[in-house]
Amino acid sequence: QVRLVESGGGLVQAGGSLRLSCAASGRTFSSEPMGWFRQAPGKEREFVAAITWSRGITSYAESVKGRFFIFRDNAKNTVYLQMNRLKPEETAVYYCAARATVGVSIRAAEYAYWGQGTQVTVSS
């Protein structure tokens, strides 16, 4: 059974940084991508970033390009999301997700496995 466990959320001032971690277990991921999504109260879940395990190919939402960075540690089966220059409007629950097939996707419906989420609050 695949299990994704996020950590690293918290409260940060606008302009600050946080690093989220997602530890995967229960399956060996090779080419399937891992992604980060976020969901603010009253809003739909939105794509933030994704990365493939094998080649490290990345994809980012336009709103976070240049500020957020996704990377992975294959030995630890862990994916990270480094978030810099955070904005108050980026307050949300951040979710880690994994696809069951190859190919990076920005659509939440195409991810088969999800973590429980970690709260990120950016104060102004």
Image (tube, grey):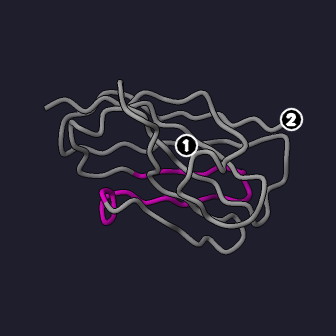
**Residue 94's x, y, as percent?**
47, 36
Q: Can you identify the residue that label 1 sits on?
A: 21
What number is the disc on residue 117? none
Q: In this view, does 100 lie above or below 39?
A: below
Q: Does residue 72 show up magenta in the picture? A: yes
Instruction: Give neighbour class at mark 1: few <14, some 14-19, many 20+ (Cα, 10 Å).
Output: many
Tell me which amino acid carries mark 2. Answer: Gln
At x 55%, y 43%, the residue is 21
At x 49%, y 58%, the residue is 70
- Residues at marks 1 and 2 touching, judged by CB atoms closer than 8 Å: no
**Could you say which quadrant of the image residue 101 lies in?**
bottom right
**Residue 112's x, y, as percent?**
72, 44
Q: Which of 46 and 64 is in front in this view?
A: 46
Residue range highlighted in magenta: 63-82
**Could you say which quadrant of the image residue 124 lies in?**
top left
Tell me which amino acid carries mark 1. Answer: Ser
At x 71%, y 40%, the residue is 113
At x 29%, y 39%, the residue is 90
Q: In which quarter of the image is the N terminus?
A: top right
Q: Along the polypeptide, which appears first: circle 1 or circle 2?
A: 2
The answer to whether residue 52 is left or right of residue 102 is: left
**Residue 4's x, y, as percent?**
69, 37
Q: Does residue 58 show up magenta in the picture? A: no
Q: Is residue 93 above or below residue 24?
A: above
Camera-nearest label, 1 or 2? 2
Instruction: Give neighbour class at mark 2: few <14, some 14-19, many 20+ (Cα, 10 Å).
Output: few
> Quick one: SS at disc 2?
loop
The answer to whether residue 107 is left or right of residue 64 is: right
Q: Is residue 104 above or below residue 40?
A: below
What number is the disc on residue 1? 2
Give the CA separation, mark 1 to mark 2: 19 Å
Q: Nearer the viewer, residue 19 or 120?
A: 120
